[in-house]
Protein backbone atom coordinates (compact mmCIF):
# COMPACT_ATOMS: atom_id res chain seq x y z
CA UNK A 1 0.00 0.00 0.00
CA UNK A 2 2.79 2.43 0.90
CA UNK A 3 4.48 1.79 -2.46
CA UNK A 4 1.21 2.55 -4.27
CA UNK A 5 0.81 5.78 -2.30
CA UNK A 6 4.39 6.67 -3.11
CA UNK A 7 3.83 6.12 -6.81
CA UNK A 8 0.68 8.24 -6.66
CA UNK A 9 2.62 11.07 -5.03
CA UNK A 10 5.31 10.87 -7.69
CA UNK A 11 2.69 10.93 -10.45
CA UNK A 12 0.88 13.83 -8.79
CA UNK A 13 4.14 15.72 -8.41
CA UNK A 14 5.05 15.12 -12.04
CA UNK A 15 1.70 16.46 -13.21
CA UNK A 16 2.08 19.52 -10.97
CA UNK A 17 5.59 20.14 -12.35
CA UNK A 18 4.30 20.03 -15.92
CA UNK A 19 1.48 22.40 -14.92
CA UNK A 20 3.88 24.95 -13.44
CA UNK A 21 6.16 24.82 -16.46
CA UNK A 22 3.14 25.73 -18.56
CA UNK A 23 2.05 28.38 -16.05
CA UNK A 24 5.43 30.14 -16.17
CA UNK A 25 5.48 30.00 -19.96
CA UNK A 26 1.93 31.37 -20.13
CA UNK A 27 2.71 34.23 -17.73
CA UNK A 28 5.75 35.17 -19.82
CA UNK A 29 3.67 35.13 -22.99
CA UNK A 30 0.93 37.24 -21.38
CA UNK A 31 3.52 39.72 -20.12
CA UNK A 32 5.03 39.99 -23.58
CA UNK A 33 1.57 40.54 -25.04
CA UNK A 34 0.80 43.16 -22.39
CA UNK A 35 4.02 44.99 -23.24
CA UNK A 36 2.87 45.10 -26.85
CA UNK A 37 -0.66 46.30 -26.04
CA UNK A 38 0.13 48.16 -22.80
CA UNK A 39 -0.40 51.53 -24.46
CA UNK A 40 -3.85 50.49 -25.70
CA UNK A 41 -7.10 50.98 -23.74
CA UNK A 42 -7.76 48.81 -20.70
CA UNK A 43 -10.28 46.55 -22.47
CA UNK A 44 -7.55 45.26 -24.79
CA UNK A 45 -5.22 44.50 -21.90
CA UNK A 46 -8.11 42.81 -20.11
CA UNK A 47 -8.82 40.69 -23.18
CA UNK A 48 -5.20 39.58 -23.25
CA UNK A 49 -5.20 38.48 -19.60
CA UNK A 50 -8.67 36.94 -19.79
CA UNK A 51 -7.63 34.82 -22.75
CA UNK A 52 -4.53 33.72 -20.85
CA UNK A 53 -6.54 32.80 -17.76
CA UNK A 54 -8.93 30.77 -19.87
CA UNK A 55 -6.01 28.83 -21.36
CA UNK A 56 -4.62 28.35 -17.84
CA UNK A 57 -7.85 26.73 -16.62
CA UNK A 58 -7.78 24.37 -19.60
CA UNK A 59 -4.12 23.57 -18.87
CA UNK A 60 -5.00 22.87 -15.23
CA UNK A 61 -7.62 20.36 -16.35
CA UNK A 62 -5.34 18.66 -18.88
CA UNK A 63 -2.29 18.34 -16.64
CA UNK A 64 -3.79 17.92 -13.16
CA UNK A 65 -7.31 16.64 -13.78
CA UNK A 66 -8.99 19.63 -12.12
CA UNK A 67 -12.44 20.48 -13.49
CA UNK A 68 -14.56 23.54 -12.70
CA UNK A 69 -18.31 23.63 -12.05
CA UNK A 70 -19.96 27.07 -11.88
CA UNK A 71 -23.54 27.68 -10.74
CA UNK A 72 -25.51 30.92 -10.57
CA UNK A 73 -24.20 32.66 -13.69
CA UNK A 74 -27.62 34.27 -14.14
CA UNK A 75 -27.07 36.14 -10.86
CA UNK A 76 -24.27 38.29 -12.30
CA UNK A 77 -25.58 41.88 -12.62
CA UNK A 78 -25.50 43.60 -15.98
CA UNK A 79 -23.79 46.62 -14.42
CA UNK A 80 -20.54 46.80 -12.45
CA UNK A 81 -20.65 45.43 -8.90
CA UNK A 82 -18.43 44.50 -5.95
CA UNK A 83 -17.69 40.77 -5.80
CA UNK A 84 -17.10 39.29 -2.33
CA UNK A 85 -15.46 35.86 -2.40
CA UNK A 86 -14.02 33.50 0.17
CA UNK A 87 -10.24 33.05 -0.06
CA UNK A 88 -8.76 29.54 -0.16
CA UNK A 89 -6.30 29.36 -3.01
CA UNK A 90 -4.27 31.12 -5.70
CA UNK A 91 -6.78 29.69 -8.15
CA UNK A 92 -9.44 32.33 -7.49
CA UNK A 93 -7.04 35.16 -8.35
CA UNK A 94 -6.86 33.79 -11.89
CA UNK A 95 -10.40 32.48 -12.32
CA UNK A 96 -12.46 35.32 -10.85
CA UNK A 97 -10.70 37.85 -13.04
CA UNK A 98 -11.72 35.72 -16.02
CA UNK A 99 -15.27 35.04 -14.79
CA UNK A 100 -16.17 38.64 -13.93
CA UNK A 101 -14.42 40.39 -16.81
CA UNK A 102 -13.79 43.30 -16.76
CA UNK A 103 -12.47 43.05 -13.22
CA UNK A 104 -10.03 44.77 -10.88
CA UNK A 105 -8.79 42.70 -7.93
CA UNK A 106 -7.97 44.13 -4.51
CA UNK A 107 -4.77 42.54 -3.23
CA UNK A 108 -1.78 43.15 -0.99
CA UNK A 109 0.89 45.42 -2.46
CA UNK A 110 3.64 42.83 -2.05
CA UNK A 111 2.15 40.76 -4.88
CA UNK A 112 3.15 43.47 -7.35
CA UNK A 113 6.79 42.76 -6.49
CA UNK A 114 6.64 39.20 -7.83
CA UNK A 115 8.53 39.13 -11.15
CA UNK A 116 6.29 38.77 -14.22
CA UNK A 117 3.15 37.85 -12.22
CA UNK A 118 3.12 41.14 -10.34
CA UNK A 119 3.85 43.13 -13.46
CA UNK A 120 0.81 41.61 -15.11
CA UNK A 121 -1.33 42.61 -12.13
CA UNK A 122 -0.08 46.18 -12.48
CA UNK A 123 -1.18 46.30 -16.11
CA UNK A 124 -4.62 45.07 -15.06
CA UNK A 125 -5.32 47.98 -12.70
CA UNK A 126 -5.27 45.84 -9.57
CA UNK A 127 -5.88 47.84 -6.39
CA UNK A 128 -2.75 47.09 -4.37
CA UNK A 129 -3.16 48.00 -0.70
CA UNK A 130 -0.68 48.24 2.15
CA UNK A 131 -2.13 45.99 4.85
CA UNK A 132 0.10 47.48 7.55
CA UNK A 133 -1.87 50.72 7.17
CA UNK A 134 -5.55 49.70 7.52
CA UNK A 135 -6.94 53.24 7.51
CA UNK A 136 -4.99 54.15 4.40
CA UNK A 137 -6.00 50.87 2.75
CA UNK A 138 -9.70 51.59 3.29
CA UNK A 139 -9.35 55.08 1.82
CA UNK A 140 -7.52 53.62 -1.16
CA UNK A 141 -10.17 50.95 -1.72
CA UNK A 142 -12.94 53.54 -1.61
CA UNK A 143 -11.19 56.00 -3.91
CA UNK A 144 -9.78 53.64 -6.52
CA UNK A 145 -12.67 51.20 -6.25
CA UNK A 146 -15.21 53.91 -7.05
CA UNK A 147 -13.11 54.96 -10.03
CA UNK A 148 -13.09 51.40 -11.37
CA UNK A 149 -16.82 50.92 -10.82
CA UNK A 150 -17.64 54.23 -12.52
CA UNK A 151 -15.85 52.91 -15.61
CA UNK A 152 -17.91 49.71 -15.59
CA UNK A 153 -15.16 47.54 -14.08
CA UNK A 154 -16.16 45.00 -11.42
CA UNK A 155 -14.15 45.07 -8.20
CA UNK A 156 -13.20 41.70 -6.70
CA UNK A 157 -12.30 41.58 -3.01
CA UNK A 158 -11.47 38.78 -0.58
CA UNK A 159 -12.90 40.13 2.70
CA UNK A 160 -11.12 37.52 4.84
CA UNK A 161 -7.85 39.20 3.89
CA UNK A 162 -5.90 35.95 3.97
CA UNK A 163 -6.37 32.39 2.79
CA UNK A 164 -8.43 30.13 5.05
CA UNK A 165 -8.20 26.35 4.76
CA UNK A 166 -11.15 24.01 4.48
CA UNK A 167 -14.80 24.93 4.76
CA UNK A 168 -14.27 27.43 7.58
CA UNK A 169 -14.59 31.16 7.01
CA UNK A 170 -12.48 33.85 8.62
CA UNK A 171 -13.75 37.19 9.86
CA UNK A 172 -14.89 39.50 7.06
CA UNK A 173 -13.65 43.06 6.70
CA UNK A 174 -16.33 45.61 5.82
CA UNK A 175 -14.38 47.55 3.18
CA UNK A 176 -16.03 45.73 0.26
CA UNK A 177 -19.53 46.51 1.50
CA UNK A 178 -18.50 50.09 2.29
CA UNK A 179 -17.25 50.50 -1.28
CA UNK A 180 -20.44 49.05 -2.77
CA UNK A 181 -22.66 51.28 -0.64
CA UNK A 182 -20.57 54.38 -1.31
CA UNK A 183 -20.62 53.73 -5.06
CA UNK A 184 -24.31 52.77 -5.09
CA UNK A 185 -23.72 49.33 -6.63
CA UNK A 186 -24.69 45.80 -5.63
CA UNK A 187 -22.70 43.25 -3.65
CA UNK A 188 -22.27 39.84 -5.26
CA UNK A 189 -21.39 36.97 -2.86
CA UNK A 190 -19.32 34.08 -4.25
CA UNK A 191 -18.34 30.78 -2.62
CA UNK A 192 -15.92 28.15 -3.92
CA UNK A 193 -14.00 25.14 -2.63
CA UNK A 194 -10.80 25.43 -4.68
CA UNK A 195 -8.63 24.68 -1.66
CA UNK A 196 -9.12 20.92 -1.93
CA UNK A 197 -7.74 20.85 -5.50
CA UNK A 198 -5.28 23.76 -5.37
CA UNK A 199 -4.27 24.03 -1.69
CA UNK A 200 -2.52 27.19 -0.56
CA UNK A 201 0.23 25.42 1.39
CA UNK A 202 1.25 22.91 -1.28
CA UNK A 203 2.49 23.05 -4.85
CA UNK A 204 0.75 19.75 -5.60
CA UNK A 205 -2.64 19.74 -7.32
CA UNK A 206 -5.32 17.17 -6.44
CA UNK A 207 -7.57 15.88 -9.25
CA UNK A 208 -11.24 16.68 -8.72
CA UNK A 209 -13.88 19.32 -9.32
CA UNK A 210 -13.80 22.88 -8.03
CA UNK A 211 -17.34 24.06 -7.30
CA UNK A 212 -18.13 27.76 -7.45
CA UNK A 213 -21.52 29.26 -6.63
CA UNK A 214 -22.59 32.83 -7.39
CA UNK A 215 -25.24 34.15 -5.05
CA UNK A 216 -28.06 36.61 -5.69
CA UNK A 217 -26.87 40.24 -5.73
CA UNK A 218 -27.42 42.23 -2.55
CA UNK A 219 -28.82 45.75 -2.79
CA UNK A 220 -26.86 48.25 -0.71
CA UNK A 221 -29.25 51.19 -0.45
CA UNK A 222 -30.78 50.26 2.92
CA UNK A 223 -28.39 48.51 5.34
CA UNK A 224 -25.05 49.75 6.66
CA UNK A 225 -21.71 48.18 5.60
CA UNK A 226 -21.50 45.95 8.66
CA UNK A 227 -24.99 44.54 8.09
CA UNK A 228 -24.31 44.08 4.38
CA UNK A 229 -21.07 42.26 5.14
CA UNK A 230 -22.87 39.93 7.53
CA UNK A 231 -25.54 39.17 4.91
CA UNK A 232 -22.88 38.29 2.36
CA UNK A 233 -20.88 36.22 4.84
CA UNK A 234 -23.96 34.28 5.92
CA UNK A 235 -24.84 33.44 2.33
CA UNK A 236 -21.26 32.35 1.60
CA UNK A 237 -21.22 30.20 4.76
CA UNK A 238 -24.42 28.42 3.70
CA UNK A 239 -23.59 28.10 -0.01
CA UNK A 240 -21.56 24.87 -0.04
Image: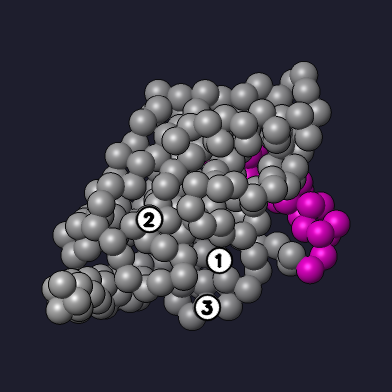
Does 136 appear in magenta?
yes
- Quadrant position of residue 225: top right
Q: Which residues are magenta?
A: 132-154
Q: Earlier in the sequence, mark 3 or mark 1?
A: 3
Q: Residue at x 37, y 73 (%)?
A: 203
| Above or below, comparing residue 44 to residue 10 in the picture | above
Q: Which residue is mark 2?
A: 196
Specify whether 198 is left or right of 102. left
Q: Earlier in the sequence, mark 2 or mark 3?
A: 3
Q: Which residue is mark 1?
A: 122
Foreground disc of the pair 2, 3: 2
Q: Which residue is mark 3?
A: 114
Foreground disc of the pair 2, 1: 2
- Callout 2 secondary element: helix
Q: Residue at x 70, y 35 (%)?
A: 229
Question: In the picture, which quadrant includes the C terminus?
Answer: top left
What is the crowding at mark 1: few (fewer than 14 residues within 10 Å), some, or many (at least 20)? some
Q: Residue at x 81, y 59 (%)?
A: 134
Q: Is residue 190 visible?
A: yes
How far apart marks 2 and 1 lie (CA) works out to 29 Å
Of 41 and 132, the residue lying toward us: 132
Amino acid sequence: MSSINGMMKIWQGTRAFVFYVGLVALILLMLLALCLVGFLPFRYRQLCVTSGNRVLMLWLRLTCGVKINVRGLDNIPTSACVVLSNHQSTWETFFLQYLFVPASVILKRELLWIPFFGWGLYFMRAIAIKRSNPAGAIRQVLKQGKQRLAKGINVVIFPEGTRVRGADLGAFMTSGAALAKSAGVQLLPVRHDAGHCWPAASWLKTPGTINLVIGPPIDTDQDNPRELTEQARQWIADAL
